Amino acid sequence: MLILAPIAAVLVQMMISRNMEYNADNRAAKLTGRPQDLISALEKIHAGVKEGVRRRVPTHASPSNQHMLIASPFLGGMLGGLFSTHPSLEQRRAALRKLMK
């Protein structure tokens, strides 16, 4: 039990962080009235992060402060999504597209 409690706490924290990102996206889309523009911006940020990782551009980020980033350069493996502080680009796009209907 002592081993599982900290892991469970981290998972809950990550879930809350992802929920806060959805809320921020939702508010930004409603504030601007242009969710498509937010989707476009997120796609550009994601593409820039992927390009930097591909070229191995050094960042001043570490996994411990990824919650402060717009898009994480720490592309996950099998458990990457579970421990991610941000929803995936696909999930964020889908949520924003629902607002466009």
Image (spheres, grey):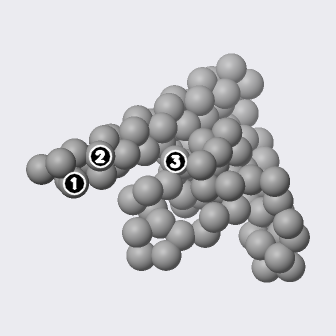
Residue 89 lies, with reference to residue 69, above or below; the image says: below
Q: Position of residue 27 (x, y in %)?
A: 60, 24
Q: Position of residue 34 (x, y in %)?
A: 72, 33
The image's mark for residue 6 is: 2
Judge from the rendering whether residue 81 lies leftward or rightward of residue 34; answer left or right. left
Q: Which residue is mark 1?
A: 3
Residue 25 lies, with reference to residue 4, above or below; the image says: above
What whole-number distance in Å separates the C-alpha atoms at marks 1 and 3? 22 Å
Count of marks overlaid on the render: 3
Q: Which residue is mark 3?
A: 85
Q: Secondary structure at mark 1?
A: loop
Of residues 78 and 6, the one nearer the viewer is: 6
What whole-number distance in Å separates the C-alpha atoms at marks 2 and 1? 6 Å
Q: Amino acid at mark 2?
A: Pro
Q: Are marks 2 and 1 in contact (CB under 8 Å)?
A: yes
Local packing at callout 1 (Cα closer than 10 Å; few below 14, some 14-19, many 20+) is: few
Q: Amino acid at mark 3?
A: Thr
